[in-house]
Amino acid sequence: MSTIHLTASEKAYLWTNYMVDSMAVCCLKYFIEKCEDEEIQEVLKYALDLSEIHTKITSDIFAKDNHPIPFGFTNEDVNLSAPRLFSDEFVLFYTSHLANLGLSFYSKALSMVSRKDVHEFYRECISSSTELNSRTKQLLQSKGLYVRPSYIPDLPQSEMISKMGYLKGFLGKKRPLTALEIANLFFNIQTIEVTKTLLIGFVQVAKEKDVKDFLTRGKEMSTKTLKELRSYLEEDELSTATPWYTYVSDSTTSPFSDKLIMFHGAILSGGGIEQYGFSLATIMRRDVGLEYSKLIAEMMTYADDGMNLMIKNNWMEQPPMASERN
């Protein structure tokens, strides 16, 4: 095994894994410290155990391969004595969302890695993230907090598309949304709700003015995007129900460093771009497809500005990269 070095793909996914999980450890420790609901606290502890195990395994793999272990995030990036910022119910919803992002990330990683120990690691990551997904979903349902997508009627029978205007959406009568278009719109709305709530809290507690300004811009983008995506469901008189428990306190004491807050925003931005891209690839109505194209361009510009801000403040860690040959 020692003669089989890590490939670029393996280094990329392991590095990202370490960075995200070291951030998650900080966040989950704070959420557990403030959590008053015992059932939610148990789920958070399970999530924390997973993140701590992941950081240990990824750092061990890097050490065996003589690859530098990333700095990541440490106890210096979290203030456990800071007052509560988010409700227990929202933290559960947030954790469920992270489990969904984890499943997407780990499945891609598994398809891209080949070394046996790395492959086995990602097989286990998928298994444990599936368990976390189930635990959070079941607890949301048992507490009456789970928001389901709209129901649509069954087709009387299977049939082929017969009208040439199936793809149009700009002029004339628009066809109703397909089930997959509804599913993606609903998932994107739920994701943006999580992001917006986090940004509301982060704007309150961020220390640096340029960070506050950047987060405020993201919050305003989220509000605008929610309105635009909901309009497509409302046109077909479909539910756009959103969680009612997205509570944010009035605390201005930050539980996290500005560095961690900015990295957290970068992860959410990347996840948003990926989901918009998937939605765009499966859209069969041109007006909705154009909307996703605009959102991707807007989100990429925002993500670039966030990256530049992190570099300016010396918060952006160098990922593994190829050698300079010139």
Image: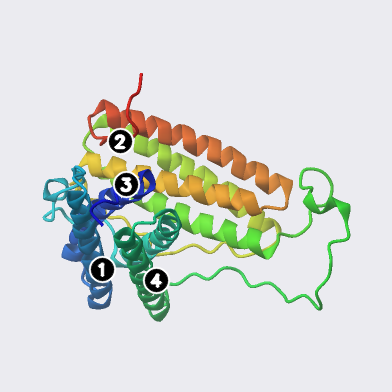
Secondary structure under the numbered disc 4 in the rendered image: helix
Residue at the spot of label 2: 212
Earlier sequence position, callout 1 versus callout 2: 1
Q: Quadrant of the N terminus?
A: bottom left
- Sequence-first disc among 2 and 3: 3
Residue located beneath label 1 in the image: 44
Residue sitting at 28 percent across and 29 percent down?
311
Alpha carbon of mark 1 to alpha carbon of mark 2: how far? Answer: 28 Å
Residue 41 coordinates in the image, percent (x, y): 23, 72
Of callouts 4 and 1, which one flags the residue occurring earlier in the amino acid sequence?
1
In this view, the mark in front (4 or 2): 4
Q: Residues within 10 Å of mark 4 (few under 14, many from 20)?
A: some
Front residue of 116/33: it is 116
Amino acid type at image mark 2 = Lys
Q: Which amino acid, mark 1?
A: Leu
Question: In front of the other: label 1 or label 2?
Answer: 1
Q: Identify the element where label 1 is drawn.
A: helix
Q: Of marks 4 and 3, which one's residue comes earlier in the chain?
A: 3
Is 128 on the left or on the right of 38, as rendered?
right
Q: Nearer the viewer, mark 2 or mark 3?
A: 3
Viewer-nearest residue: 101 or 126: 126
Q: Residues within 10 Å of mark 1 (few under 14, many from 20)?
A: many
What amino acid is found at the position of numbered circle 4 in the picture?
Thr
**Which residue is pictured at 47% across the width and 45% down the height?**
222
With respect to residue 96, does 105 lie above or below?
above
Q: Nearer the viewer, mark 4 or mark 3?
A: 3
The numbered disc on residue 130 is 4
Please provide percent x and percent y for residue 104: 45, 59
Proximity of marks 4 and 1: CB atoms separated by less than 8 Å: no
C-alpha span from label 4 to label 2: 35 Å
